[in-house]
Amino acid sequence: MTDAASIHVLLVDDEPDLREPLAEYLVRQGFRVSEAGDASKARSLLVLEMPDIALVDIMMPGEDGLSLCRHLSEAKGMPVILLTAKGEAMDRIIGLEIGADDYVVKPFEPRELVARIRSVLRRAHKPPAEVEEDALYTFEGWTLDPLKHRLTDQEGTVVTISSAEFRLLKAFLDHPRQVLDRDRLLDMVQGREAHLFDRAVDNQVSRLRRKIEADGRDPKLIQTVWGGGYRLAADVKRIAAPSL
């Protein structure tokens, strides 16, 4: 998705002095923009339409941006870029842990934000490899459908995972039994230089373990490699998706 005219942006910020000029700038760049001054208005807009990406301010009255980010990522599967203040480093870490795809720090250059939007959407809509574009991943009784972003267990029950958890799991499935260090995982999952956020990877791994391990405290599938990172200790197969 590279054509700005086809991109619908949800902009959620309680500061009209920032939100309105930014919305006007994005419209001038060819984007379609829906504005919301708080999380409640954003949720109301989602009843009527589904934007391609959300720009969400962290600090808002009422429901904060982190809570909204979790909802958009886990329930809607929508890419999210957080708009943060300089002093919100911990909130940025938490945001990445719960599924945010990127962040920009206020005050920011609007052109940088546009570049971030395009980058996040390229990652979100990157087509799978041509040879197995609709193939499913199977491992230890689990099945991941990369096109539908859907994970099912041995009984066929769908297990909800956030967009960040999906990208992390797919990184492991694309490199089974290989040691992936934190820097490499950060690059795969966040698609940006994010060396300050090693803890974000550790916490995302912990969250993923709780969903796919029999005992998240004694992981057998996603193993910690001391001083090296993590490794998926399972064989992975690609199988054709069932015909509709």
Image (cartoon, helix red, strand yellow):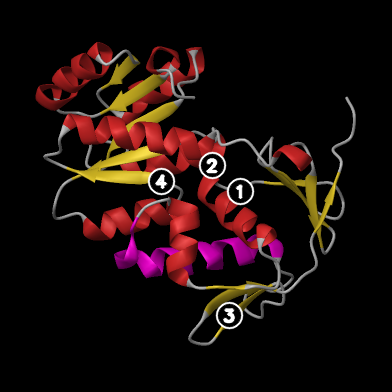
Q: Is residue 137 left or right of residue 166?
A: right
Q: Which type of secondary structure does the marked residue at label 4 adopt?
A: loop
**At 27% across and 36% down in the image, what residue appears?**
62
As drawn, the label of residue 74 is: 2
**At 47% across and 35% down in the image, what residue appears?**
122
Give the number of the mark in front: 3 or 1. 3
Quadrant position of the C terminus in the picture:
top right
Q: Which residues are magenta?
A: 193-212
**Amino acid of disc 3:** Thr
Residue beneath disc 1:
161
Q: Which type of secondary structure does the marked residue at label 2 adopt?
A: helix
Residue 200 on the magenta span: yes
Cα distance in 3D space between marks 1 and 4: 13 Å
Mark closest to the chain's N terminus, 3 or 1: 1
**Amino acid of disc 4:** Ala
**At 22% across and 42% down in the image, what residue appears?**
59
Q: Which type of secondary structure does the marked residue at label 3 adopt?
A: strand
Provide residue 188's location: percent of width, then percent of height. 50, 55
**Amino acid of disc 2:** Glu
Residue beneath disc 4:
100
Mark closest to the chain's N terminus, 3 or 4: 4
Residue beneath disc 3:
224
Cα distance in 3D space between marks 3 and 2: 25 Å
